Amino acid sequence: MKYPRTPAVLVNDKDFRLADVDTDAEGPFAEKYTDKASAQARLLALRQRLAELQEMLYAEHERSLLLVFQAMDTGGKDGAIGNLLTGVNPAGVQIAPFKAPSAKELAHDFLWRVHAEAPGRGHIGVFNRSHYEDVLVTRVHGLVDKKTAHRRFDDINSFERLLTNNGTHILKFFLHISKKEQAVRLQARLDDPAKRWKYEPGDLTERARWDDYQDVYEDALRHCSPPEAPWFVVPANQKWARDLAIAEIVVATLEKMNPQPPAADFDVKAQVIE
C-alpha cells in the first residue's frame, strides 16, 4: 500500500534511528498548511470520511482495524486518539488502555490480556499503550533482559500475524516528541490545576531514563514493523501536524480496505411501508 505523503516515517529499515526523525517536522504538510488553522478544514474532511468508512466497516462485519498508540510520557496519545475519533459512532469503536498488569494478568503469558482486547469484526480497535509495554518498560526497569525481549519480539510478530490472517488490519503509531517538548508539557501540567491530575512525581524518574527508553523503542520499531503491521513514527511536537498525519494514514487504509455493506437478505420490493 502507498500511504499519503505526511511527516510520519514508515519504519521499514533494520538500521532505523529515532534520532534521524525531526520531532518538529511538518514534512509535505509545510507545502500546503502554515499552521493548525489552515489544516483544520482538511482534518474535518478526514474525520467525516472516517465516520463514513467506519459505518461501512461496521455494517460489513467481516474485517476490523487495530490502531496501536505508543509514546513517551506526555507524547499525546489521549489527544491524538480523541481528535482522530471525533464524530465516529462509538458503537463501532473499542478502546483499550493498558496499565500495569494485574495479579491475574501476570499469572498468564504477556499477550493473554491483549488478545482479549483485539477488535471484533466490524470494529475499529484502539490500544492506548499496548503489548509493546512488555518489551519497553519492563526492559528499561531491568525486569527482562535483551534476550527475553527479542524472544518476545518474535511472539509479538506472530501474534500480529495471527490477527492479520483473521481479517484485522493493523497500524501502529509512535508519537515522537523531543525531551525539550516533554519538559514543557510536564511543566504545563504542574502549572494548571485542571491538568495537575495527569502529573505524577514518578514522571521525573521515568524522564531520567529518556535515553534508555529511546534505545528500547528503537529496537522494538526495527524488529516489529512487517508490511502487514507497520510502525509509523509521527513527529508529535506540533499537535496539528501529528493529528493530520494520523488521520491521513488511517483514512487511506480504510479506503484501501473499501468496506461494503451486505446485500439485503430479503425481497426489498416486497416491503410495503404504510
Image (cartoon, rainbow, N blue to C red):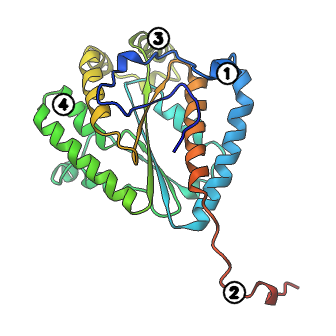
Nearer-N-terminus badge (1/4):
1
Vertical arrangement, residue 27 with respect to residue 1, above or below: above
Whether residue 162 is visible, yes or no, is yes
Residue where numbered disc 1 is placed: 36
Q: Nearer the viewer, mark 3 or mark 2?
A: 2
How far apart marks 2 and 4 lie (CA) works out to 56 Å
Looking at this view, is 260 or 41 the one in front? Answer: 260
Q: Could you say which disc has been placed on residue 139 in the image? A: 4
Q: Residue 22: x and y, percent?
A: 46, 15
How far apart marks 3 and 1 lie (CA) works out to 19 Å
Disc 3, disc 1: CB below 8 Å?
Answer: no
SS of the residue under disc 4: helix
Looking at this view, is 100 or 42 the one in front? Answer: 42
Q: Residue 29: x and y, percent?
A: 63, 23
Residue where numbered disc 2 is placed: 266
Disc 3, disc 2: CB below 8 Å?
Answer: no
Residue where numbered disc 3 is placed: 184
- Crowding near the residue tagged with mark 2, few <14, some 14–19, many ≥20 C-alpha atoms within 10 Å: few
SS of the residue under disc 2: loop
- Which amino acid is tagged 2? Phe
- Which amino acid is tagged 3? Val
Nearer-N-terminus badge (2/4):
4
Disc 1, disc 4: CB below 8 Å?
Answer: no
Nearer-N-terminus badge (4/3):
4
How far apart marks 3 and 2 lie (CA) works out to 60 Å
- Which amino acid is tagged 4? Arg
